[in-house]
Amino acid sequence: MPKGSLREQIIYPLKSSEFFAKGGKDEELENLMEMVDIIHVLKRESQGFESVREWKDVLSGGEKQRAAMARLYYYKPKFAILDECTSAVSLDVEGKLYSQAKGFGITLITVSHRAGLKKFHDYILKFKENSIEFSPMREEDLNEKEQIQENEIENENEAHKRT
């Protein structure tokens, strides 16, 4: 997480002064934080967007990942390479984040162990022992995903029971 205000966590690499000079409004950032379910962070900070903290220490892993997704939504690039970017959030939040990114028209290139993310992609790149396979997403890839996702949900539920 970059040093700076809460606002600057979302608009990085811009500084607040640059954000406002470009006509930026905190309401836009507030909407993005709401979209990624971290509006509570803004509400708990007494100085709101002006709060400056050691964000890497203050935010949980899931909050950091959601802030990064809010930054992605703010910039709306044509494509994004996402490497385990939702590993610290629940599967339902993960689906919501990916759906929103797709809704912004962002082409997603994902590196992940979570098979449930396949449904957000049109192509799959598989690294095998002696080869690389690039192909359109097939029905069999998606069916494989469903079984793996069921196992992921069971594992996640078991982990929650233990805590």
Image (cartoon, rainbow, N blue to C red):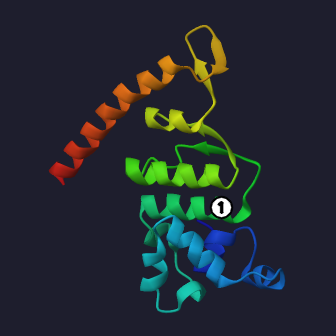
Q: What element does badge 1 sit on?
A: helix
| Residue 139 % position (x, y) | 51, 20
Q: Residue at x 43, y 27 (%)?
A: 145
Name the residue carrying label 1.
73
* Location of residue 103 with respect to 81 vertically, above or below: below
The number of numbered discs placed on residues in the rendered structure image is 1
The one of 152 and 132 positioned closer to us in this rendering: 152
Residue 3 appears in the picture as rendered: no
Q: Residue at x 30, y 40 (%)?
A: 153
| Residue 138 % position (x, y) | 56, 20
Residue 139 appears in the picture as rendered: yes
| Residue 20 % position (x, y) | 77, 85
Q: Residue at x 63, y 10 (%)?
A: 131
Left or right of residue 14: residue 2: left
Which quadrant of the view contains residue 130?
top right
Q: Quadrant of the N terminus?
A: bottom right
Left or right of residue 151: residue 19: right
As drawn, the residue found furthest toward the top would be: 130
Q: Residues within 10 Å of mark 1 (few under 14, many from 20)?
A: many
The amino acid on which the numbered mark 1 sits, given as a three-letter code, is Tyr
As drawn, the residue found furthest toward the left would be: 162
Q: Quadrant of the C terminus?
A: bottom left
As drawn, the residue found furthest toward the right would be: 21
| Residue 156 % position (x, y) | 28, 44
Which quadrant of the view contains residue 19?
bottom right
Q: Residue at x 47, y 92 (%)?
A: 46
